[in-house]
Image: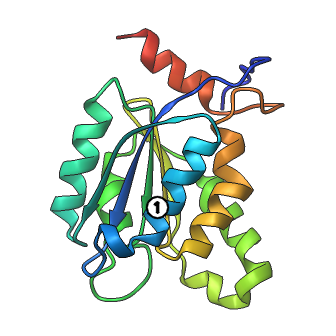
């Protein structure tokens, strides 16, 4: 974790990926929520894509974004459950250089207050790949709200104390 903080929040370039076999732009409420939230927080949208729940389709998009110096963070919604086609953790985990163990733990802790023991069915994960931070959360809009408002928004805010991930992301940007 980075202890770097600023007195003014620094805008980041975020990409949003919705993993779904059934959603399109017209009914992707989770992806739309994440886009609205990141823009409201002063960040920029680098790109938004909807991809079917397929390990290789997911990896192709994520691999392109982690290789792109113009993408600082990736928000992924969907594919984190236990149904037959839920494959986001399997697609993304091998790409991580470092896991953010606390993201899934804290997400489940916070969501327990809303959904009780059903939170054990969430395989929310986070990590870094090529110094790009990646957060994978469930596909419901409520789950995205829980993750954004309870964790992600602060960790992508350079003014958050005592620490945030922006300093790690800046290291990546300054290398390019």
Quarter assignment of residue 63: top left
Q: Position of residue 2 (x, y in %)?
A: 67, 26
Near-viewer residue (87 or 69): 69
Dot 1: within a 10 Å radius of its alpha carbon, few (fewer than 14), some, or many (20 or more) residues? some
Vertical comparison of 44 with 109: above or below: above
Q: Position of residue 23 (x, y in %)?
A: 31, 76
Q: From the viewer's perspective, tell me whether residue 64 is left or right of residue 72.
A: left
Badge count: 1
Quick one: quadrant of the C terminus? top left
Residue at (29, 88) in percent of width and height: 84
Q: From the viewer's perspective, tell me whether residue 66 is left or right of residue 64.
A: right
Q: From the viewer's perspective, tell me whether residue 85 is left or right of residue 154.
A: left
Q: Position of residue 105 (x, y in %)?
A: 67, 64
Helix, strand or loop at disc 1? helix
Specify how the rendered protein is coloured: rainbow
Quick one: quadrant of the N terminus? top right
Q: For mark 1, what is the residue?
A: 32
Vertical comparison of 132 with 140: above or below: above
Residue at (50, 72) in percent of width and height: 138
């Amino acid at each position: 974790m980075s202890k770097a903080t600023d007195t003014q929040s620094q805008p980041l370039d975020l990409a949003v990926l919705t993993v779904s076999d059934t959603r399109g732009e017209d009914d992707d409420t989770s992806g739309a929520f994440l886009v609205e939230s990141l823009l409201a927080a002063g960040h920029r949208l680098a790109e938004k894509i909807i991809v079917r729940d397929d390990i290789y389709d997911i990896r192709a998009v994520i691999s392109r974004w982690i290789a792109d110096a113009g993408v600082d963070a990736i928000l992924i919604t969907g594919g984190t459950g236990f149904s037959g086609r839920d494959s986001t953790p399997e697609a993304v985990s091998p790409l991580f250089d470092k896991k953010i163990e606390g993201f899934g733990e804290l997400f489940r802790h916070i969501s327990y207050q809303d959904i009780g023991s059903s939170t054990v069915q969430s395989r929310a994960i986070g990590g870094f790949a090529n110094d790009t931070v990646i957060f994978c959360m469930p596909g419901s809009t409520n789950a995205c709200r829980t993750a954004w408002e309870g964790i992600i928004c602060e960790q992508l805010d350079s003014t958050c104390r005592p620490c945030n991930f922006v300093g790690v992301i800046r290291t990546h940007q300054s290398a390019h």
